[in-house]
Structure formats: structure tokens, C-alpha cells
Amino acid sequence: MRSSNPVFSRRGFSRDNGTAGFNGQQPQAGGPAVGTNPYATGNPYAEGTTNPYATNPYAPQDTQLGAPQQARGNVMTIDDVVSRTAMTLGTVVLTAVLSWLLLPVDPANLGKSYGIAIGAALVALVLSLVQSFKRKPSPALILGYAAFEGVFLGVISAAVSTYIADGVVIQAVLGTMAVFAGVLIAYKMGWIRVNRRFYGFVMAAAMGFMLLMVTNLLFAVFAGGDGLGFRSGGLGILFGVIGIILGACFLALDFKQVEDGVTYGAPREEAWLAAFGLTMTLVWIYLEMLRLLSILQGDD
């Protein structure tokens, strides 16, 4: 199943080995092997499933739930994903803190700071696109993306905290952590079932959301003001909530992607892609949370 995350939707841990992978028919993570899968009639991704990493000599040959895994040398594990994600997010946090401290947002330097932030965001976008089109994950590209994304977040957060809503950054960080923990618990408890219908709904909602945001931006650029009003007032609050909900859905899709990769023996290097995708999703949630809280405090 391809995630709605820009990284996973492009590659999705797929390997060019001629087998059905995560960009085609999908395995049910943690499910029984082909022929014994009880979800075969209800889950479209479970029918005709093959191991997309069959050519990996370290991949497990038996994907039966609870079956012993004999060879686990060069395969991705949850520990790999956690460590790579910690490194990537740590880079974002470090550069965000440094940019907050070193790039002043006082009125005399505000324009310069915004220029640096926009430049960093563009570089981060380019690096993310390059990585998305590469056949293999590049830790240098991923950490470079994280560094420039951190610069952008640091300047924007400092500006919002200074001129719009003091203390809102801590609230946005805590809110992002709460969303992550809530989605993870719901996913592990089985309250969120990631299937074709869920994926289709999230993708359609995300496309509609992005089209509205781009339209609002164009109106703001050419007509001035807040465009169609999607970024302030009551509509701003509504679309902020929708943006956070979409981010939560992205997390569920990302968790499914990671779970499938671990279950079916994705090469260890793919943990960098998981870290990359999770970082992008968390950045999305943080920005939407920051904007929503800024609107709410500005209306007080």
C-alpha cells in the first residue's frame, strides 16, 4: 500500500525484482502466509500476496504470524527505524534551535530572516524531491533535508512566537507529540484499519485540501489580504483541524508501510526512507498545529 506521504507514495519501499511490492498488491502486515490468510476475502491487499523482498537473502522466508525468523542479518527492524528517525528528527530540532537563536526576528532583520527561511524551505524541497526520485535512500540527502527544514521551522516558529502568540511553539510541539502517540496507540490497538478504502479517502481528501490551499495562496498573491480566508478566522480554524486530521491519517499510512517493511524483510537501508517519510509527516502536523493555535490565541 502506498502511503500518502510524498516519499512513500513515490517509492513505497518497492524493489525492482519483478515481484509484487508495496506499489502493487500489498501484504497484510503481520498476517499469515498466502493460502492461510483469513483476511483474503475482505482485504484486497491480501489476495495473491508475495514477499516483495524474496530476492533479499536475509529476508524471512516464512511470514506466518508468530513464525520463527531464521535469517535476520541485513533486514530492517523497528530499532533501525527508531534510530534513523531519531537522527533525522534530531537534526531538524537542532538546526531549528540554532536558527531561532542565531537568526534574529526583530523588525530590523525580519525581512532578512524570512528570506533565509524561504531559501531554506526551497532547498529542503529540492532535496526531498531528489531523494524521492532516487532508487535508494541517501542518508546525506535525508539529513540535509532535515537540516534545511529545521532552519525554516526555527525562523517561522520564532516569528510566530514573537509577533503573534507567545508560547505557542511549545504548545504546537506538545500537540504534535500527542497526535503521534494517539495515532500510534490507535493503530496498534487496531482501531485504525489501513485498507484500500482508507487509502483512497485520505488521498482524495489530501488532494482537495492542497488544491484549496493553492487556490487561497493565488488569491492572496494577486488580490491581497488573506485570499479566500482559509488561513484565518473560522475557516482558518476549520482547515487547521482538517490539516491535522490529514496528518494523523498520513501517520497511520506510514505506520502500515513500516510494519509491512519489517514483516517482509525490507533491506536495512530502507529504514532511512521510513525516517524520511515520518519526519515529513510530523513537520506537516507541527506546521498545521502551529497555525491553528496561533489563530485560536489571536482570537482571544
Image: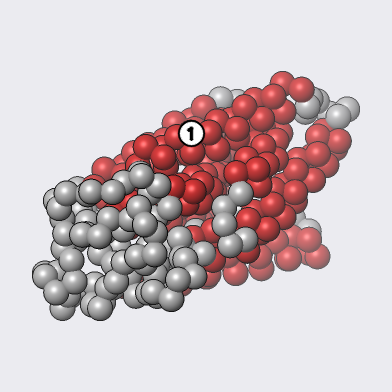
Q: Is mark 1 on a helix, strand or loop?
A: helix
Question: Residue 146 in the image: x percent, y percent?
Answer: 62, 40
Q: In this view, does 23 lie above or below 157?
A: below
Q: Which residue lies furthest to the top in this view?
A: 101
Q: What number of labels is visible?
A: 1
Quarter of the rendering containing residue 102: top right
**Viewed as shown, does residue 241 lie left or right of 142?**
left
Question: Residue 26 in the image: x percent, y percent?
Answer: 32, 70
| Nearer to the camera, 91 or 104 | 91
Question: Residue 194 in the image: x percent, y percent?
Answer: 30, 62
Residue drawn 22% across the image and 49% down it? 69
Mark yes or no: residue 69 visible.
yes
Q: In this view, does 188 lie above or below 213?
A: above
Residue drawn 26% across the image and 43% down it? 185
Q: Name the residue under label 1.
A: 86
Q: In which quarter of the image is the N terminus?
A: bottom left
Of the residues shown, which amino acid type is indicated by label 1?
A: Ala
Mark yes or no: residue 285 visible.
no
Colour theme: secondary structure
**Viewed as shown, does residue 274 lie left or right of 255?**
right
Residue drawn 55% across the image and 37% down it? 88
Residue drawn 58% across the image and 62% down it? 135
Question: Residue 266 in the image: x percent, y percent?
Answer: 39, 55
| Nearer to the camera, 32 or 61 | 61
Q: In this view, does 280 lie above or below 205?
A: above
| Nearer to the camera, 32 or 239 | 32
Q: In this view, does 252 lie above or below 84?
A: below
| Nearer to the camera, 219 or 127 | 127
Q: How crowded is mark 1: few (under 14 residues within 10 Å), some or many (20 or more)?
A: some
